[in-house]
Image (spheres, coloured by chain):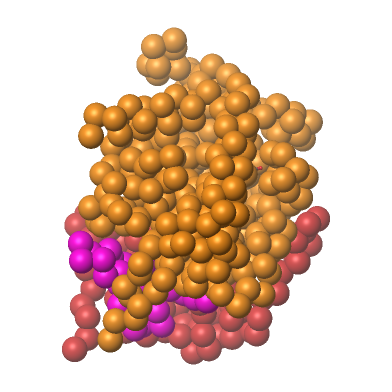
Chain colours: A red, B orange
Amino acid sequence: MRIEKHPILQFDRGEKVTFLFNGQEMEGYTHETIAAALHAAGVRELGHSQNLDRPRGLFCAIGNCSSCFMTVDGEPNVRVCVTKLKQGMVVEEQHGKGVVKG
Amino acid sequence: MIRDVEVLVIGGGPAGLCAAKAAADSGAHVLLLERDDTPGGQLVKQTHKFFGSERQFAGTRGFQIGEMLVDEINAHENIELMTDATVLGMYEDGIVTVLKDEKHLKLRPVKTIIATGAAEKFLTFPNNDLPGIYGAGAVQTLMNVGGVKPADKVVMVGAGNIGLIVSYQMLQAGVEVECVVEALPNIGGFLVHASKLRRAGVPILTRWTVKEAYGNGKLEGVILCQLDDKWQQIPGTEKDVPCDTLCLAVGLTPLAELAWQAGARCEYIRELSGHVPICDENLMTTVEGLYCAGDVSGIEEASSAMVEGRLAGYAVAVALGYDVENAQKEVDAAKAELVELRSGPMGGKIRAGIAKVEQKRGEA
Ligand SMILES: Cc1cc2nc3c(=O)[nH]c(=O)nc-3n(C[C@H](O)[C@H](O)[C@H](O)COP(=O)(O)OP(=O)(O)OC[C@H]3O[C@@H](n4cnc5c(N)ncnc54)[C@H](O)[C@@H]3O)c2cc1C
Ligand code: FES
């Protein structure tokens, strides 16, 4: 859910865009990070731990901890908490270490 | 290609912004690097009115202080501000590498000021990796920068200033704050913040902790329990609290990796909340020409981070021979200001930490 009324802040979210999350179409805004847009849509499980495959969400939201790795437009290990949303992005939950395309 | 830089400032929080301005005001040419797309550091997320003295803008909301500092930087012809620029490495030959727009840049600075701030600490308990267990900074980023409601129902861990302030900010964003849990026997943060929460009906449970978290794929609740005088969990006191978010505000630790990489001597000092570079009274590390300012050299506050930034910036100007007489005056003034800021009862911990740094420096 997005905050519509705040006693102190106003939010400039940018333009509305659509993107794919695990093949499903979703909406977000260009000034949002991928993590924020997913969180607003109720998605908290972003990836899985490399060895035990336990579900992982974000922890720091500023690019410090690597807890939020996802595969974006085919590129694995993208920190979605510091990556801004773009029209048509393909965002996928990641299992394992991910494979970097040659 | 290697780019030559006169003064490199790493990190655009209050410390880095003030350091850049001080050096540039004296006549030096400064390159300021910030990894985020917006400079301001922790200030960007702070909607409350700051405490501190007037010289450090007390009474102004944190994000507005940040905007004021950034405006000064943008207007300054001696400062180049580069955002979305993360410093990756500092090498023994003095080369600094940066990731900017998918490109790898190489810099050769004459003087460098590290002002990278801090990272949040974590807590150990079963299932502490479930999605929905967030650092307090993450919650703030989601709601105050992203404009996204961070939780429906939250349990906060930590009754220091950050835990109290972020709990209140969540109430303002329409989140149900179930309770604040604190392992210490008393509330660490200012009582003004605690009473705001109490008035809103949020209980602050001292001598309680998180026993474990549970949930299928994401957090569904936590089991809290009481602690005895020896910090042991008391069996039979468990309380099941359903919630979708657990917020950890259990302290910060300095982000000193870059100083470490550059070869600066670092030591663990508990009062400064982690491994910190051993700096001299001008904030220079054991590496000639490499300085640290702000939370990176010990967790404190924005007020002291700004003054440390100014101190390091002017000290660099003196070392480079810019406007030396005035810059030296400013260095002395900043040192006096720091003594004053750290003089109250709240400054006891930081004073003890700095005394240890001085002692370690003496040991060599
Ligand atoms: C909830 C909360 C409330 C607070 N309230 C108050 C208050 O009322 N009064 C007060 O005085 N203080 C307050 N503080 C404390 C204050 O915000 C911090 O002490 C202060 O921001 C520290 O400043 P800094 O410049 O050292 O670090 P930061 O503000 O953390 O800035 C560091 C900057 O460096 C950047 N960076 C890090 N690594 C790199 C890299 N490798 N390359 C490029 N850039 C990098 C980061 O992105 C960041 O912008 C509060 C803090 C919090 C979390
Ligand atoms: S949540 Fe820590 S890097 Fe993204």
Outermost residue toward the front in this view: B325
Report the number of discs: 0
Specify the quadrant that holds the N terminus of chain B.
Answer: bottom left
Horizontal side of residue A35 vs B187, given as left or right: left
In the image, is residue B258 part of the stretch drawn in magenta? no
Q: Nearer the viewer, residue B44 or A21?
A: B44
| Residue appearing at x 59%, y 36% in the figure | B336
Q: Nearer the viewer, residue A92 or B340?
A: B340
Horizontal side of residue A28 vs A61, given as left or right: right
Specify the quadrant that holds the C terminus of chain B.
Answer: top left
Query: Magenta residues?
Result: B80-106
In the image, is residue B83 part of the stretch drawn in magenta? yes
The answer to whether residue B14 shows anywhere in this view is: no
Q: Position of residue B329 (x, y in %)?
A: 59, 48
Q: Position of residue B320 (x, y in %)?
A: 43, 62
Q: Position of residue B246 (x, y in %)?
A: 51, 43
Relative height, residue B247 to residue B201 (above, below): below
Q: Could you tell me what secondary structure mostly forms the magenta stretch? A: strand
| Residue appearing at x 26%, y 66% in the figure | B94
| Residue appearing at x 71%, y 34% in the figure | B193
Q: Nearer the viewer, residue B151 or B67?
A: B67
Displayed quadrant of residue B58? top right
Relative height, residue B363 to residue A12 (above, below): above
| Residue appearing at x 74%, y 30% in the figure | B192
Outermost residue toward the top in this view: B229
Q: Nearer the viewer, residue B117 or B195?
A: B117
Q: Position of residue B17 (x, y in %)?
A: 56, 61
The answer to whether residue A50 shows anywhere in this view is: yes
